Image (cartoon, grey):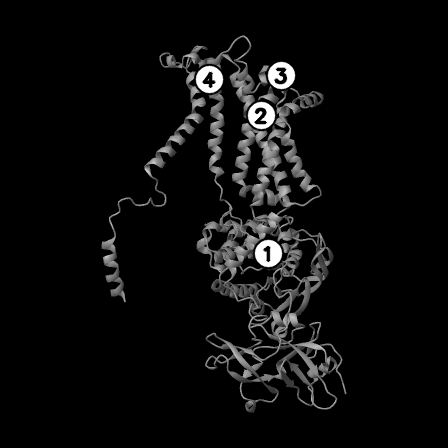
Amino acid sequence: MTRAITLNHVSKTYPHNIHAVQDFSLDVTPGEFVVLLGPSGCGKSTVLRMIAGLEEITSGELLLDGEWANDRTPAERGMAMIFQSFALYPHMTNRDNIAFPLKLSGRRDEMDARVEATARMLGLQDQLDRYPGQISGGERQRVAMGRAMSRRPTAFLMDEPLSNLDAKLRNRLRTEISQITRELGVTTVYVTHDQAEAMSLGDRVAVIRDGVLQQVDDPRTTYARPANVFVAAFIGTPRINLLEAVVHAPLTGRMSIELGRQRLQLPDPLSPDHQLLRIQQGRPVIVGLRSEAIRIDHPGNARPGEVPASGVVEHLEYQGHEGLVHLDTGSRPAVIPDLESARKAAADADRNGRGTRPLTRLRHLASARRTAAVTDPGPPPPYPPDTPNLGKGDLIVRTRPDLHVRTGAHVPLLIDLDQLYVFDHRGRRICPMPEGLPGLEY
Amino acid sequence: MTQNTLTASAPAEDAAPPAVKRAPRRGERRTGTSLVLHLTLIVASVIAVFPVAWIAWVSFGPDKTDFLHPGDIADKFSLSNYSTVLGDTEFTQWFLNSMIVGLGTCALGVFVSASAGYAVSRMRFPGHRPLMWTFLVTQMFPIAILIVPLYNLAANLGLLDTYWILILANCTTAFPYCAFLLKGYFDTIPVEIDEAGRVDGLTPFGTFYRLVLPLARPGLAVAAFYTFLTAWGEFAFASVLMLSEDKYTLPIGLATFVSEHDQQWNLMAATGVLIGIPAAVFFYLIQRHLVAGLTAGASKS
């Protein structure tokens, strides 16, 4: 019924040497919910479309239940796909839309019963005899889900199913999708650029950047142990604070990390996680601090593992259940490219199979802008435009909502070294220590 | 606060001078503009309607010289021309021939141009661009050039004086335009619909037949209309390729009323009217499909 999907070193290359996906390997076990997460144009949809059979695989192999399936037609794969644009058949009623896959598979006898059951499950009973054009966006996506479910597919493939809906509806449908897929126990591959969606839905999250798989782990691990600086930056709101730093490891005395004007003293003796830092001595590294790893308090109140620092309040964000304080600590924020890709237009053009003539490109740009405007009420892009250049705020700290600080005030900070991430110059995480490295004894 | 605004607005209303000459609102026109507009439209309509009305009027005059003094027709109004055409000529046979050729061209032309348009719209294959150019280039030849080679071809194939050759010949002229038209129409149907169909278990042809064609109905209606009318009114090919009188199509039959020695304008006018009716009916049948907007609701846009 439900099936395992295995991608072995799969690559996709478009004409003109555009590498959409490179050496992608992923093993989805039966019944698992895997989310492909990445910025637009990173190739996550291409991976999904290769699984669906809508896109040819340039190299590598796709196994369905262990059988080589590169050349199977989409119909033979027996999967169901849900599209961002819904892709309902507008000339059929919602009932016929849901029944269509059943009709094709020749199961007419049980068709009516199944359609009714599906509609009940999705709360669509009253909409069945209307046309897709006559119902709201959320209902359309539900009909699309009904169409996918009615045939009892071996796997669900969802291509950003929620990004055309407004924020409230999105949350509700997210819950529904989660419930339904768990209830049916069908393997699901879900594509999104919204990390909140990925974290809340996935059994595992696969983070993709520029066609390359960065990390596959359950949401907790991805958040707590990001493989590299890109994953760290992409997951979590507010975005993790990433600062340029230098490690100092004097022969005598304690090791420290220099963040611009400030220095974080590492505890002595070093924790195993911090030992690898020694070999980075003198080299530029990137320090990552989630906003909950820092708190505003006096050094006297430090708990074990916390080191003092200080900063000037630049800006306050009150959010009701919490406050976000933007601080200037005199360090330089690290810039991570590709968090939002510029390749979107080109990727879209390729996807639709229409060349890249200037006019079509313009049209795509225009429509991209239009859809962007519609889909915007989601979470803000993880890269607030004012952080890197404008203003000097380099650190965002999460606080209690009742904390009152003045803009421009000098505040003492406590940084929890247990939640300190350090990435080397190539972006790989070196602290906490990566798994699979032999322990360093001394 | 509310009181303030109330008292402030009251005198302003009083002070406003009674509208002597107010500017026209949106959608309203001044009398002068309206007059000019209507005159222009009336003149245009008369120009459009006059030839048709003239033919229809002349067709009621029983003599072949009646078109010279149309005022007299009212006095000797008769349907004798129609009875002559319908009863004493091969009209019914010609009509049948025209129908066969028109509907044949329509069916074949729409089928071929729809599949070609779909291929060009959705598939990428070597020579895809040049193919579109070829469609265009064939449209650039005057038909007169094609007649002789087509005649030779038909003669060699033994197809002269058959419906098939005329249908094929008419398709060659109607096909490029229709393929272009339908390609443009297919382009407006989201590719995701095809993809959804393929995932749901349709073959590529199934996608075309069950999803794309129903959605392209307005486009297909235009193509059908165009191909049918092309064949219905076509003269040059029919005059060369159809040899025997029982294979004549209506335009050829129509031409037999006016020859070197005798001009039966009255009969010709009546035949003209009779030819026009099926074309109008065909248009009427198809026009409700000409309404666009079937794709509304397919996807968010």
Where does label 1 land, which residue? A81
Q: Is residue B10 above or below residue A390?
A: above
| Quadrant the C terminus of chain A occupies | bottom right
Whether residue A392 sits left or right of residue B43 in the image: it is right
Write down the residue under mark 3.
B243
Residue receiving disc 4? B270
Report the front residue among A99 and B221: B221
Which of discs 4 and 2 lies nearer the camera? The answer is 4
Foreground pick, B227 / A67: B227
As drawn, the label of residue B101 is 2
Subunit ID for the residue under disc 3: B
Q: Amino acid at mark 3?
A: Leu
Q: Kindly check if marks 3 and 1 are in contact, taking CB atoms under 8 A apart as contact.
A: no
Q: Is residue A70 above or below residue B134?
A: below
- Tell me the distance, in whole angstroms, between the alpha carbons under discs 2 and 1: 45 Å
**First in sequence: mark 4 vs mark 2:** 2
Q: CA distance from mark 3 to mark 1?
A: 58 Å
Q: Residue at x 49, y 22 (%)?
A: B275
Q: Are marks 2 and 1 in contact (CB under 8 Å)?
A: no
Identify the disc placed on residue A117: none
Instruction: Find numbered disc 1 in the image and state the secondary structure of the residue it sits on.
Output: strand
Residue situated in front as seen by the camera: A203 or A108: A203
Query: Which mark is nearer the camera, 3 or 1?
Result: 3
Residue A156 sits in quarter? bottom right
Which residue type carries mark 4? Ala
Do marks 4 and 3 share a subunit? yes
- Name the residue rendered at 65%, 31% in the picture: B138
Inspect the image, locate mark 2, and give the three-letter code of the amino acid beneath it. Val
Residue A397 position (above or below residue A65): below
